[in-house]
Each structure stands twice: as C-alpha cells, then as structure tokens.
Amino acid sequence: MAGELDKSWMYVLGDEFQKTYMLELKTFLQQEKAAGHIIYPKNTEIFNAFNTTPFDKVKVVILGQDPYPGVGQAHGLSFSVQKGVAIPRSLVNIYKELSTDIPGFKIPGHGNLVKWAEQGVLLLNATLTLRAGESNSHSKKGWEKFTDAAIKAISEKKSGVVFILWGAYAQSKIPLIDASKHFILKSVHPSPLSVERGFWGSKPFSKTNEYLIKVGKEPIDWQIE
C-alpha cells in the first residue's frame, strides 16, 4: 500500500506503514479478498484523497466516516461519486446548501468533487475501504488510526486549515485538532436523517472562504462544472 501514497504524505505518514496495526490491516484486506469479498473503492483508488490533495496543498478538510457501499460509488474521496453515478442524498443536500450559501452557485448534474480536492480540499473518510454493500464493515480494523495520524499531522505541521465536521462522528475528531491555529466548522450531518436539525443555513462554504481570505490563502471555487 505504501507505494501508492503521494510523496508529500509519505514524508509525514510513511512510518505508519511499518506499524503493527497497518500490517494487520493489510493482512485483513488480503483475507477479505481471498474470501471472495468485493472491496470498495478499488485498490488504485484507496488513497485518492491523499493523492489528489498533497499534504502541502491542504487548506480544508471535509471528514466523512467510510466509503459509499454501492456499485460504482466510492472512488476514494469522501462524499464524492464518479460522473454517471446517481448523486447520493447527502451530497444533494450539500449542493442545496451551497446554492443558498454561495451566490451564483449552480447545482451540477453529477457528484464528482475532484475539483474541490485539486484546490486543497482534503475529502477524507476515517475508514478508507469497506466490503461491497456493507457500510462500516471495515471500521475498527486500523484505518481510523491511519487517518487520525493524518489529521494530527495536519494540525501539528500546518496552520490556518479549515476542518468541516458534519455530525457526531466527525466531531469526535476535534481532540486531534489544535483549535488555536485552525478553524473548526461543525454542524449536523447533511444526511436526510439529520439535515433539518441545523445543516440548512449553516453556511460552511462561505465561512470557509472568509477564513481562508483572512489568513491570506486563496478561497475555494466551490462551483462544480
């Protein structure tokens, strides 16, 4: 797995690959495949979040829990799906909030968020794989230790990063983040189950850009073509 990670991330996370938990995780994934289980995303896309948003480019972190479990959905970026795949309901709600938060934002016809990632938005799931059709099937197997290490590295080695934390699970990562030198935005999750309880009108996207400008960074162009 190590050879698939962006060099700038390998510089800060490379030691993780030699730790016992990561070796055990690699064995677990091999056992899953040997047992005939389909794993999402495909092997070459597991580290897409890191490879699309190198460490030195990270300005914003949007934290998800684990990949989408449906056929063709997961491609290594939280909340994102490939073009041609139906837009998940949480992302539909994210787009609706964007349309009221960012003047002129037009809701796109697809759910591919690579454009955000290329601008420095790390679309990170806490767990990077799952068994097809089974949400959280690879939770507590080691991925969370790896992604916690990534969050800690961002917190310790960078400054002025926006952490967008939707829902209780994402907000459980707050102790990993130094709030004195980063900006934490939190609200309920955009899931249809919780969106009415405070996601609408939370304006995370304009607040993110206001902060980035304040600390001398380029704002994010949230419009998806």
Image (spheres, rainbow, N blue to C red):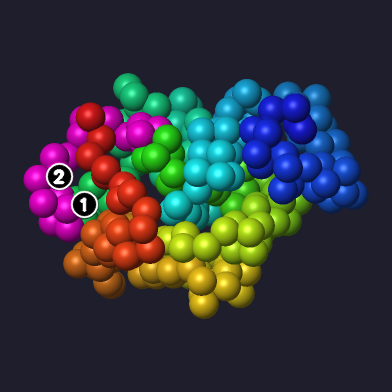
Few, some or many residues within 10 Å of mark 2 (<14, 14–19, 20+)? some
- Which residue was labeled with disc 2? 105
**Could you give the CA–CA distance between mark 2 and mark 1, rounded to whole angstroms?**
7 Å
Q: Are the residues tagged 2 and 1 within 8 Å (C-beta)?
A: yes
N-term mark: 2 or 1? 1
Q: Residue 31 placed where, x, y %?
A: 82, 32
Tell me: residue 214, above or below residue 119.
below
Give the SS element for disc 1. Answer: helix
48 in the magenta segment? no
Residue, x 39% and y 70% (percent of image)? 186
Majority secondary structure in the magenta region: loop
Give the SS element for disc 2. Answer: loop
Q: Amino acid at mark 1?
A: Leu
- Which residue reaches farthest bottom? 180
Q: Quadrant of the C terminus?
A: top left
110 in the magenta segment? yes
Q: Amino acid at mark 2?
A: Phe
Residues rendered magenta in the picture: 99-115
- Direction from residue 146 to residue 178 in the image, left or right: left
Q: Residue 69 placed where, x, y %?
A: 51, 38
| Residue 131 visible in the displayed image | no
- Which residue was labeled with disc 1? 98
